Amino acid sequence: MKIALTGNPNSGKTTLFNAITGKIEHVGNWPGVTVEKKEGDVKQALLSGGESITVVDLPGAYSLSPYTSEESITKDFVVNESPDVIVNIVDAGNISRSLFFTTQLLELGVPVVVALNKSDLNEKKGTVIDTLLLSEALKCPVIETVATEGSNNGLASLMEAAVGVKGKKQSAPALRGSRKAETREEVEAVDKKRFALVSDIVDQVERRKINSSKQTTQDKVDRVVAHKWLGLPIFAAIIWVVFSVSQSWLGPVLADLFVGWIDAFYGVVEGAIGDNVNPVLSSLLLDGIIGGVGAVVGFLPLIMVLFFMLALLEDSGYMARVALIMDRFFKKIGLSGKSIIPMIVSTGCAIPGVMATRTIRNERQRRTTAMLAPFMPCGAKLPIIALFAGVFFNDNAWVGTSMYFLAIAMIIVSGLVIRMITGDKSVSYFIMELPEYRFPSLKRAAVSMFSRAKAFIIKAGTIILVCNAVVQLLQTFNWQFQVVAEDMPGTSILAALASPLAWVFIPLGFGLWQFAAAAITGFIAKENVVGTLAVTFSVTNFIDVEELALVGGGNEVMGVFGIGAVAALSYLVFNLFTPPCFAAIGAMNSEMESRKWIWGAIGFQLGTGYVLAFLVYQLGTLFTTGSIGSGFVPGLIAVGAMIVSVVYLIHKNNKTASEAVLKAA
Amino acid sequence: MKLNDAALDKEYYVSAINACEEGMGEFLFTLGCFPGEKITVISQVASSYIVSIKDARYSIDENLAAAILVEDSSLATLAV
């Protein structure tokens, strides 16, 4: 049989879904985390024999009249795909709103079971709900659940109740005229009665100790963290702590340990294959595969620590306040605080981030957000940040933090430019439910961290491995398929392919074919940047910088990479702000639903990466050495051309706009 | 009176919703924010408002606050 999970946003549907299926879908303490439907099978332990149950987790909705596109997924599913049973998850702390949706679901003719979730929080607040009376009033089973608990959570009884009602007829609480209502006025009149009915029920079944419209400690916290002047510095400080712990303190310590194991593994394999194997084959295995993949995987501990801390933040309820803080700034560029949610999700991975734009109703805002969210430093870009922070900037936390806020700043600037190009001046409203703060759960954060780590390892073992092997082969052979002489790496196929592009990068400070090759493989997956650099510079350990010094033979890092700190920063910026990986571009394409927008987005992102890297390198060189960097004039011409074309687009739009006004007149 | 002018911590009754964006009125309705229902402004932070509707907290911007018209509870009770 098939069960649909429905309920208001942030009522804990996905947490409950994970608890009953054993899956690890992404959860967070804010409304709108789930934007697509997800299926899973109920764990055997929760079934008292009988048939297997498939559960479908749906995006949250406040009613059956969808406001945003992800809400319509929910409506379409429960109305058209006739599940056997609907489990309606109701936040026990807010039945006066949630039961409105419940009464709508009860009229669909599909048996409903109400899961009164988060009932542990009610106990703490002294709110009492008479579930028997509620069940009588709604004419459907009501089960108290605590989906966050491992045991004694009511989930077995919930499943039992769901099996029990399958195929049975339930009669909905009487609402006169609800079947006949067609016009807007009629529907509204019925819905008013619906809320009146809900209020009646709540009056009967609920006893509250604390009136919810009174000030609480949480409200005091809100006034500080969302304060006009303090809000942003507090946000910056929190992100700085996150990056310090993951990139400067705990992360490198764990990474050192981990890289030691990888090195040991390298040694074991090297010893095992011995000297009798073809050198091309052994270097493919050792330097290409183990070395390249190892260089990427070496950053896993840093990434895991970062994901762990971000998961704690998401669990606390703070992220919804970030949306509130950012709304003010995003308003100015024609977006709203809602756009920050996809950007926060993008710090994990840009693909779900781009998909999260579905919660934005305005089409231009949605497309603009899908275009800009990939600027955020995602999990795959972290190894690049960590590499450059570690090698060139002594593991400083400011590198990661500043990249995070540079991304936000670039999003704001770009948003403004896109608004000028599209010429849309519409302003929209901002409303967002503020979830209650709670103490973040270490267990949930650990689960989220391991699921992301697993995805990272799978990616490293498949796509990254293949790419590194290809890079190693292309680097080993020249066009005549002869092995490249050791002192002439520039004659390889890889060098020949990447060199023309390297010319383009001279004004950005990194006109070496190795960097060009790494930037290209980065489009397949951003982790490849680190892998390709490892293979092309034959450095397998990026964590332990002292070892780099040995490889470089004296002049440390400069000797190995041939570029200085300013060019390194420029390369970092270039990789963060060029178009994301192909998978994320695919996600952008499907959310934008417009050829013009997707090509515009790719062009815009390429331009942003180039211009930003140019500025970082040339200005940085000017400040540090007092003279301009290499290739300034051609670079300036390229950057100038890009700016002129943007200005042309804005101008063209203004012209069409004024022509439209003239025509109208 | 617009919600922007409402006093903090005081319960008001919604008298009208004046939102120009299509669907916003209906959306607010599903949250329980429609004429006759209660609303309380909990705090004003920067240019946003934190309000309590039914048993939930929402953050709304000043544009939306201006679209929600409220009246004094005492007047509303008298009218009933």
Image (cartoon, coloured by chain):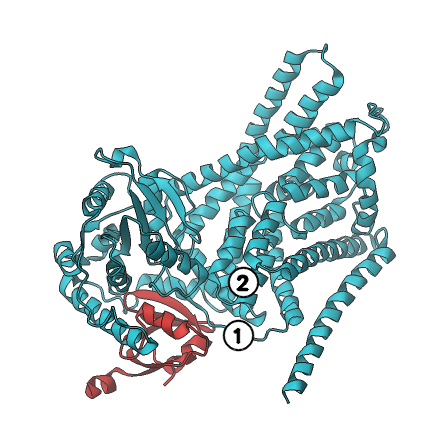
Chain colours: A cyan, B red
A436 or A664: which is nearer to us?
A: A664
Going by the numbered disc 2, the residue's amino acid type is Arg
Left or right placement of residue A425 versus residue A180 in this view: right
Q: Position of residue A615 (x, y in %)?
A: 75, 57
Q: Residue at x 80, y 27 (%)?
A: A477
Q: Is residue A152 above or below residue A70?
A: above
- The tag on residue A427 is 1
The furthest residue to the bottom: A665
A603 or A659: which is nearer to us?
A: A659
Task: Tell me the mark number nearer the camera, choosing from 2 and 1.
Answer: 2
CB within 8 Å, label 2 to label 1? no
B35 or A330: which is nearer to us?
A: B35
Label 1 neighbour load within 10 Å: few <14, some 14-19, many 20+: some
- Counting residues from the start of the chain, the first of labels 2 and 1 encountered is 2
Q: Residue at x 58, y 54 (%)?
A: A588
- The tag on residue A635 is none
Q: Position of residue B41 (x, y in %)?
A: 34, 74
Left or right placement of residue A660 versus residue A86 in this view: right
Is residue A389 visible in the rendered image? The answer is: no
* Quarter of the image that includes the N terminus of chain A: top left
Q: Position of residue A577 (x, y in %)?
A: 66, 53
Going by the numbered disc 1, the residue's amino acid type is Val
Left or right placement of residue A319 versus residue A475 in this view: left
Residue on which the image places disc 2:
A366
CA gap, disc 2 and disc 1: 13 Å
Same chain letter for marks 2 and 1? yes
The chain under label 1 reads A
* Quarter of the image that includes the C terminus of chain A: bottom right
